[in-house]
Amino acid sequence: MKNLMGISKFEKLFRLVGGLDIDKNDIVRLNDFVDKITIRLLETAIKNTSLNSRDVIWMSDLPITEGLEKSVKSFKVIDNDLEVSPILKNNLKIPPLKYEIGTDLLEELPFIQGGIIVSLIKSMKIIDEHKKNPQTEDWKKATDIFETLL
């Protein structure tokens, strides 16, 4: 996150969702993680777009699981107060893709990224429900879960 206001909003998000305290180093890890997972989702969406003989990636092309969908809904509720999605939208990094991203998907991507963050926080709490301040090893375990599933 590029500014202190953004950092404080992400700190609040982690506290609200999982009772976790994070610092600036965690924000860097979070950015890298969210970018990586977003690209993976888009890579699968490209395959689905191609299979459907289209040249625009639609929201329905993304492989959104039921769990991620619930996390996106949870994030949207929290985002009404915190307003994290504008920061995610501003920081959205999309590499050149084979197909154009549809307007519906482009508008929804910050919320999907917010859902990814909520899922990550919940994963950290499942790994250690008593954890208050995630360390490098905690981040590794949580992100390894995503690596295994995605």
Image (spheres, rainbow, N blue to C red):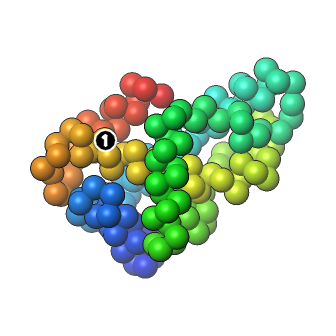
Tag 1: Cα neighbours inside 10 Å, few (<14), some, or many (≥20)? many
Name the residue furthest bottom.
Answer: 5
Name the residue at 33% across, 67% down: 11
Q: Dividing the image into 4 quarters, which one contains the N terminus?
A: bottom left
* Residue 120 higher or lower than 20, as above or below: above
Give the total of numbered labels. Answer: 1
- Label 1 sits on what residue type? Ser
What residue would you read off at disc 1?
Answer: 123
Q: Secondary structure at mark 1?
A: helix
**Residue 70, percent across and down?**
49, 44
* Pick the front one: 114 or 96: 114
Residue located 40% across and 33% down the image: 146
51 versus 97 height, above or below:
above
Identify the residue at image location x=71%, y=53%. 106
Residue 83 percent coordinates (x, y): 51, 72
Residue lying at the far top in this picture: please name it: 51
Question: Which residue does the image show at 76% across and 40% down from the upper left?
Answer: 58
User: Could you say where residue 110 lies in the image, as x and y percent from the top left?
Assistant: 59, 56
In-image side of 56 versus 30 (left or right): right
Q: From this viewpoint, is residue 2 visible?
A: no
Identify the image quadrant of residue 55.
top right
Viewer can see residue 75: yes
